[in-house]
Amino acid sequence: MQPLPALHPVPRRRWSSRATRPLLALVLVGASLTVTPAAPAGAQDLPTAAPLAANPYERGPAPTVASIEATRGPFATAQTTVAASSVSGFGGGTIYYPTSTAEGTFGAVAISPGFTARQTSVAWLGPRLASQGFVVITIDTRSVWDQPASRGTQLLAALDYLTNTSTVRTRIDRNRLAVMGHSMGGGGSLSAASTRPALQAAIPLTGWHTQKSWSSVRVPTLVIGAENDTVAPVSSHSEPFYTSLPATLDKAYLELNAASHSAPTSSNVTVAKYSISWLKRFVDDDTRYEQFLCPAPRGTTIEEYRDTCPHS
């Protein structure tokens, strides 16, 4: 007999974990129907089995559509500035983080802006993601002209700074890290994922990169494109990025309906809700968020959605 699947596998659990639940439920029900003899007299103080532990990476209450669409999540946040002169490998930035560690440490996310842009173009994502239970750094690149590969290297440098040197390093679980970015920063997030397969998630936002094939990536990746993008058209960027990722990878492709290249640079409910869900699912291994990703979501703001998850 094959052993039953572990209740809490390590992060990056495949979508097929959903299929283990009915089996687990049957096992638990069968266990609850087992008749046990009455305890002998004086046995009241015998130790009992410890209850099953919850997923140690879950942070915050059970999610709802309203909670992932809200401009702020359940965690109060603060922020601190990182001066370019105080770091090496990237151009400084801003760290957003939950103020309470009562629930434990958090996963961390580094976000890069696009070509010629500064961190202000992705700053809206900082408090939005942090308030959902992540430590987030939005970075400036060393030069606004830096190309995607350089931006990928700088995203990794920012994560290393967060976990090794920053004032919030004790709030972070260094094994649960992710990258995001807009335009060339999105291309940079793919480069970073290719370079560091230990990352738990990558989200290129209307990404731009001269490299079209990412078959080497082993990091769960949500590719977000925009229907009316003329800078990084989905037909030559987001779509080939997605299709080139391994078929066995946890991946999804979200195309924003009637949206332009700059859609992710200002508050966007669709970008936020699915980014939150992806990060929660793969950085926090929180299967409570599967409901928002699988089956594939539909709606007026979504032109197209593809994924590798099984439909229940």
Image (cartoon, rainbow, N blue to C red):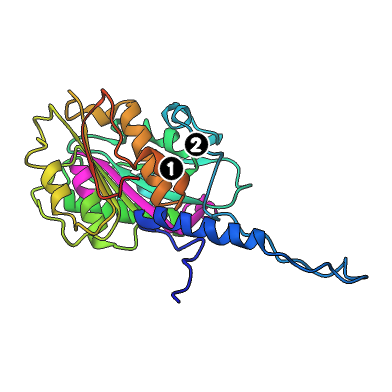
Left-right relation of 200 to 284: left
- The residue nearer to you, when weighing 28 against 30, is 30
Looking at the image, the residue that sits furthest to the right is 42
Left-right relation of 129 to 265: right
The residue at the point 35 percent across, 57 percent down is 14
Left-right relation of 80 to 44: left
Mark count:
2
Please name the residue that numbered disc 2 is placed on: 63
Which segment is the magenta one?
165-188
Look at the picture and state if 42 lies above or below 182.
below
Q: Reply yes or no: does residue 288 show up in magenta.
A: no
Please name the residue that numbered disc 1 is placed on: 289
Left-right relation of 19 to 172: left
The disc labelled 2 sits on which kind of residue? Pro
Find residue 221 and report its horizontal and vertical position in percent: 27, 50
The residue at the point 22 percent across, 52 percent down is 190
- The residue nearer to you, when weighing 195 against 55, is 55
Indicate the secondary structure of the residue bearing disc 1.
Answer: helix
Q: Are marks 1 and 2 in contact (CB under 8 Å)?
A: yes
Look at the picture and state if 3 lies above or below 17.
below
Find residue 90 and report its horizontal and vertical position in percent: 30, 50
Question: Does residue 151 appear in this view?
Answer: no
The quadrant in which residue 216 appears is: bottom left
Q: Reply yes or no: does residue 174 show up in magenta.
A: yes
Q: Check the picture and name the quadrant holding the N terminus.
A: bottom left
- The residue nearer to you, when weighing 154 against 11, is 11
The quadrant in which residue 226 appears is: top left
Q: Earlier in the sequence, mark 1 or mark 2?
A: 2
The disc labelled 1 sits on which kind of residue? Tyr
Find residue 81 and report its horizontal and vertical position in percent: 44, 40
